Image: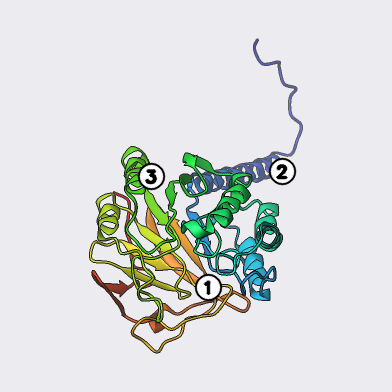
Amino acid sequence: MGRLPQPASTANPERSWTLCKMKTDISLWFGVAAVLLCGLAGQARGETIAVITDLNGSYGSTRYHARVDAAVAAIVELQPDVVLSAGDMVAGQRQPLLSREQVRAMWASFHQHVTDPLAAAGIPLAVTPGNHDGSAYPVFAAEREIFVDEWSTRRPAVEFVAADSYPLNYAVAVGKVLIIGLDVTTVSPLPMAQREFLEAVLAAHGERFDTRIVFCHLPLWPFAQGRETEILRDSRLAQQLAAHDVAMLVSGHHHVFYPGIDDNGVLHVSAGVLGGNIRRFSGSDIKSEFSFVLIEIDNGVVSVSARAAPDFERQIDSGRLPRQIAGPDGELQRYEPGAVARSAR
């Protein structure tokens, strides 16, 4: 249907031109704004991951230090895509053994202080066992069973890539990041079944992701004084990570924050402690700080920092950390802020 005839205009021509110009200017403004908004919407947001570890207090305690609550509050404010816990969430697994009721009470307290506030904020929590909450030593089988039960009903709201052995060995996807949780609580090389699990996940799914991260409790490197022998002595694992272009291995247990790059370019991140006590770095008089780790990933480029107690607003100056950490397989070189840890292939 054609346009209807328009009545002859009696308006002032100069005023009509002014109104027309105003409409044109407004249309152009909205057009530019729309283009800018579309451009911003097209810029994919990178991934942010917080890491907490070793939150437990004295043996059997259901109490958590106030800095744990402060750290959780700071993390909620930051709104990361996921929080990783590298173990030792409760204070068990020593002699004499605790009763099931005592262990359940500790977990109830942990959920009250950590799990529930994160869940209320819509932040997924992915966990791995530690030597005080779910270790593989046979004498602590009952507490390990409780660990599995507690987390089987609290799966993080993320995409699972491998879930059959959750919460011990599993893999999840967070944006363009593949995160693999490994059950590493004993001082010995990975059992063959675990090695095969890791290989299968990386071989089948690694290429889908820009960044690959593995997290566990025990580290491959001796980060802290007094814990030099409490490491995963497994050079084959280090080679396996490098072969599959894994960006980093995140660990707990040593109670120090240290990011170091090995000879193959893999970043090893020892996460700082929130409970218990802080330690000195291996081969150094420098003492670490209570902290949590923040991992930020943009287009496959990884950056790592740590937020320090008491308010977790201050970033730890990595330039004050030891330049190297010596280990059985050479030296880790301190990661420098702004350095590319490992980018996408």
Q: Earlier in the sequence, mark 2 or mark 3?
A: 2
Residue type at the position of mark 3: Phe
Where residue 32 appears, as percent x and y from the top left, is 55, 46
Q: Residue at x 32, y 55 (%)?
A: 343
| Residue highlighted by disc 1 | 273
Helix or strand or loop: what does disc 2 sit on?
helix
In the picture as drawn, the residue positioned furthest to the top comes out as 1
CA distance for labels 2 and 3: 60 Å
Identify the image quadrant of residue 117: bottom right
Disc marking residue 199: none
Where residue 62 appears, as percent x and y from the top left, is 69, 68
| Residue highlighted by disc 3 | 209
CA distance for labels 2 and 1: 71 Å
User: Closer to the camera: disc 1 or disc 3?
Assistant: 1
In the picture as drawn, the residue positioned furthest to the bottom comes out as 285
| Residue highlighted by disc 2 | 15
Q: Residues within 10 Å of mark 1 (few under 14, many from 20)?
A: many
Asked if the residue under mark 3 is in contact with the one under mark 1, i.e. CB atoms within 8 Å, the reply is no
Where residue 155 appears, as percent x and y from the top left, is 59, 45
Q: Residues within 10 Å of mark 2 (few under 14, many from 20)?
A: few
Where residue 35 appears, as percent x and y from the top left, is 53, 44
Q: Residue at x 35, y 45 (%)?
A: 193
Identify the image quadrant of residue 110: bottom right
Relative to 40, does residue 159 appear above or below in the rendering?
above
User: Closer to the camera: disc 2 or disc 3?
Assistant: 3
Q: Earlier in the sequence, mark 1 or mark 3?
A: 3
144 and 332: which is toward the camera: 144
Q: Earlier in the sequence, mark 2 or mark 1?
A: 2
Q: Residue at x 40, y 84 (%)?
A: 320
Is residue 135 something that shows in the picture? Answer: no
